[in-house]
Image (cartoon, rainbow, N blue to C red):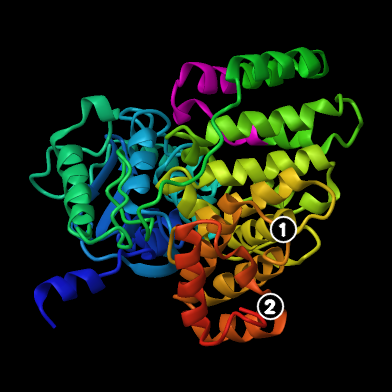
Amino acid sequence: MDNDEQLDNIKPETSFEVQLYIYDLSRGLAQTLLSQLLGKNMPAIYHTSIVAYGREYFYGGLGIESCDPGATVLGEPQQIVQLGVTEIPYQLFLEYIFGLGSSTYANGTYDLFHHNCNNFTNELANFLFGKGIPEEIIKLPHEILDTPLGKTLAGFLNSFNIRPPGQGAQLSGAPQSQSSYQRREMAESNTAANNTESSGNADEETYVPSASKRKVYKYSDTPITYKDVDANETVKKLTDLVNDKLTAEEQLLLKEWSDFITQDNGGWSLGDEHIVLFRKILENEKNQFNDESAGLIMKVLQTSALRDGFVLLLHQDRKDHRLMSYLNKIEQVELNQQEEICKFAINLCGLPSSFDWLMYISEWFEDDGQSSSNCRVTIRIAVHCLLHEKLKSINQHGLNLIWNIALREVFDDTAIELSTALLQYLHSDLSEENVHLALTALSRFLAISANDIAMLAKMIGPNIDKFKGVSERNDKLIQEVTLKIGGSTASSI
């Protein structure tokens, strides 16, 4: 195998191991001397950090900092906990942590009691997994520290500096005023990503959107997106309908979301509380909102999905999955909402980072105990809309979503399930364009799981010869699909 072939076979890393490094700042004194002096068990004075993407990230009086794992003045950690594997891309992780370093965890914000290193690692773990660090670490007993000795200890710990010897740059500050270390970190991220790019033909992974140098799309076709929402008009209608039903705080949250989509203020202005508000309006449990409100919320989400910073908000929903659990109920909402839900999912395919989020396979659980994942919800939306019997426009949205999904490499079970829906859909009378979209997606899924899909095709049909002679591009696709199936198109595919 030559070098070019080896490079073509390199796949971008899509999952990353994450560890929690646990240190005892007292170096054993808490367990022995301090426990005796205070008359209460104090196993340690915990300091924790997150090790991910080959670096150790920690928070102290100077803000968020980073170093090689184990390189702080604390030396080797007392304990290393394997937190698991995250699917969040490195570039997105950097954007998130730089945002924290310029806001919540900026230089000078450290407080031993209420805003310390363990709060930072807990928040970071929730971002990466939707699950925090061990509770006993977060709850450093206040009754122990709230003593004369404890207060003396707190004064020392608040000013304690654990950065590696000679490190003068911290990982904080907004991206526009990056430290030398931030610039190096971002440069390394871009270099690593650029090294995975391919310069192959149109069927290779060459689609590289402006802000990201990661290979997310396997094929070069541009994702279908809906850009026809008038953001200003939509938020005005929504505000007029719901504002008098909201508290003053909720009105401010709605205004901030309005500013995000109309003025492109950036995702840092939005947080979990904004998702809580939108879910409240969508659920409408107290019947206090007009029926049109839910559809307008979905339109706001559609236009939000086309903005770079939106994925940062999505990742704040990794713990409670409020948005995806609502989308998972697509069959239970009104038809107009079903359309808007599918269009929201389609727009999430337009940017690599949100496309990644849409297809995450990490499991989470609904309130009824049923397991799900972002990927499973996405497939459910696509299949439901493609095969909907009452409204043709929903069928079109389902097809567009499946076309988008087929732009990237997916797992066998995803390819099989979506192909099953496509085979049923191809029994219909379709336009030349929709035949092209459906057969292209089917051909790409066949490249992933040819044997299983071929077996399904022979059981389900249809006879795709009926689409012959309409266009040269579809005739070519019909021949291509038939060859992959390994049979004649005369009776079925």
For disc 1, the marked residue is: 429
Residue furthest out toward the right = 287
The quadrant of the image that shows the N terminus is: bottom left
On the picture, is 199 further left or further right than 46? left
Compared to residue 108, the image places residue 125 above or below, namely: below
Residue lying at 13% horizontally and 71% vertically, measured from the top left: 4
Quarter of the view holding residue 37: bottom left
Identify which amino acid the numbered label 1 is placed on.
Asp
Q: Is residue 147 visible?
A: no
Disc 1 is placed on an element classified as loop
Q: Is residue 31 visible?
A: yes
Quarter of the view holding residue 429: bottom right
The quadrant of the image that shows the C terminus is: bottom right
Around disc 2, counting alpha carbons within 10 Å, would you say few (fewer than 14), some (14 to 19), or many (20 or more)?
some
Residues rendered magenta in the picture: 256-275
Please state the horizontal and vertical placement of residue 163, each as a whole percent of the image.
Answer: 20, 46
Residue lying at 68% horizontally and 18% vertically, measured from the top left: 249
- The numbered mark at residue 393 is none
| Magenta stretch, overall SS | helix
Residue lying at 31% horizontally and 44% vertically, measured from the top left: 212
Compared to residue 333, the image places residue 309 above or below, namely: above
- The numbered mark at residue 461 is 2
